[in-house]
Image (cartoon, helix red, strand yellow):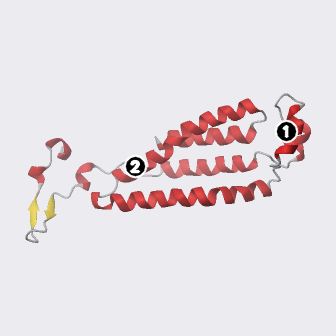
Amino acid sequence: TMLIGLAFQILQLIWFGLGLSKWMMWIAGVLAAASSITYPAISAYASQNADAEQQGLLQGILTGIRGLSNGFGPAIFGLLFYFFHVELDNSALEDNTSHHGGEVSNEQYTSMKMPGGPFLFGAALAFLAVLITLSLPESAPLAKKIDIKKKTDIDNDYHDISPLLEAEILA
C-alpha cells in the first residue's frame, strides 16, 4: 500500500510540474487524494513491526515526523520556487489567463526558468522514497513479536502465557 500511495504521489507531482491548464490541476488533485493512503500505510507497517509496549512511542515519533514535515516542507519548497524563478503573483496570472480561456500563455510559461521544477524535484524525492520502501523487510512474523514467557509483576518470575493466547496467533 505504501508503494501504491507513493506511485500516486509521483504521478501527482509530475502532473503538477508539467501541467499548463486548470483542468490538469484538477486531475493532479485527484491523484493527490489517492496518494493520501501513504501515511496510514506507513503507520500500519511500523506498528506491525513494533512491540506492544512500543506502540505509543512509535506512533508519537511518526506523528512528530509528520508534523515537522508539514512545518518545514512549505518553507523548503518555498525556497525551491524562488530558486526556480516561479512567479507566484496571482494578478499576473489572472491578467494573462483571462485572455486565453484559463490556459497559461507560452510567453508567461517561458518567462519562468522552470515553473514545474519544484514539483519535479518533489517527484524525484518521492521516487527516492519508493526505492527506500523497496528495501524495507517484510513484516516480522507475529510469533516473533509475542513474548511467550512473560515476567509478571506479582512474583517477579517468568510464567508461560501461551495458554492465554489464541491458537491462530501462534500458528
Element class at badge 2: helix
Q: Position of residue 47 (x, y in %)?
A: 36, 52
Q: Is residue 48 left or right of residue 119?
A: left
Q: Quadrant of the C terminus?
A: top left
Mark 1 or 2, which is nearer the eye? Answer: 1
Q: Position of residue 19 (x, y in %)?
A: 75, 36
Q: Mark 1 belongs to which amino acid?
A: Glu
Considering depth in this image, is 30 or 11 the residue closer to the camera?
Answer: 30
Q: Is residue 147 left or right of residue 132?
A: left
Q: Is residue 87 left or right of residue 156?
A: right
Residue found at the far top of this picture? 101
Residue on which disc 2 sits = 45
Q: Is residue 150 left or right of residue 18?
A: left
Residue on which disc 1 sits = 94
Question: Which residue shows up at 34% across the image and 50% down it?
Answer: 48
Q: Position of residue 151 (x, y in %)?
A: 14, 66
Question: Which residue shows up at 70% across the image and 35% down it?
Answer: 25
Q: Position of residue 108 (x, y in %)?
A: 89, 41
Compare marks 1 and 2 and give the one earlier in the sequence: 2
